[in-house]
Image (cartoon, rainbow, N blue to C red):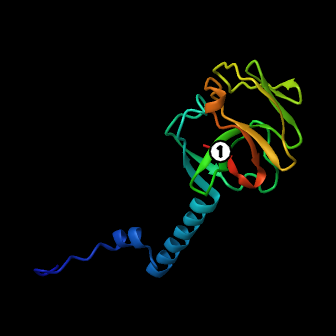
């Protein structure tokens, strides 16, 4: 029994649940898990916040999403992928959909995206538009990206070619 001023000791089973049988081993595990989570959070899964309406209705303004930075480690980005593109530094990014692959020509006619002169099936585009943009060749190390909200005026919409080295990864959540 504890005397006045002493803190009573925890029962053995409570101590074992909270700390484990070996406190040094528990501390080592906690440090390893902290390091793993830090690496994953900074280099593998990068959280980003959507600011703006260019990806509506697929991604809402002010929503938080996660970018898989290892998605294109073993293969190239594909048409239809939503990607994060480094704008100026790691903290300023664009979130766009790839519609044109390296070596292709992309244009907009009567609001339809044409790749190499053929209409592109885009089920994710919900708002019609009347964009007119002449053919634009995509370089061999570039991708043509555009947002899903085509109801915006073409001049207000960030779109165009993005170099492969600026594509951070694929948006997964």
Q: Which residue is mark 1?
A: 171
Left or right, 97 with reference to 29? right
Left or right, 93 with reference to 102? left
Q: Residue at x 34, y 68 (%)?
A: 14
Instruction: Determine the image quadrant of residue 113.
Output: top right
Name the residue nearer the viewer: 166 or 65: 166
Total number of numbered discs in the rendering: 1
- Element at label 1: strand
Q: Is residue 43 above or below residue 142?
A: below
Name the residue nearer the viewer: 167 or 65: 167
In percent of width and height, residue 156 lies at 61, 32
Q: Residue at x 69, y 51 (%)?
A: 169
Q: Residue furthest left?
A: 4
Q: Residue at x 36, y 70 (%)?
A: 13
Quarter the N terminus occupies: bottom left
Q: Is residue 83 above or below residue 166?
A: above
């Amino acid at each position: 029994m504890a005397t006045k001023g002493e803190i009573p000791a925890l029962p053995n089973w409570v101590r074992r649940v909270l700390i484990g049988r070996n406190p040094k081993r528990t501390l080592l595990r906690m440090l390893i898990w902290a390091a793993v989570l830090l690496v994953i959070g900074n280099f593998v899964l990068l959280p980003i916040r959507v600011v703006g309406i260019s990806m509506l209705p697929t991604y809402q303004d002010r929503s938080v999403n996660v970018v898989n930075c290892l998605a294109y480690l073993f293969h190239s980005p594909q048409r239809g992928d939503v990607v994060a593109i480094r704008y100026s530094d790691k903290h300023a990014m664009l979130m766009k959909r790839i519609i044109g692959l390296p070596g292709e020509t992309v244009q907009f006619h009567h609001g339809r995206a044409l790749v190499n002169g053929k209409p592109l099936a885009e089920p994710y585009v919900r708002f019609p538009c009347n964009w007119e943009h002449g053919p634009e060749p995509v370089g061999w190390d570039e991708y043509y990206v555009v947002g899903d909200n085509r109801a915006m005026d073409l001049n207000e919409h960030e779109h165009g070619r993005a170099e492969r080295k600026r594509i951070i990864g694929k948006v997964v959540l």
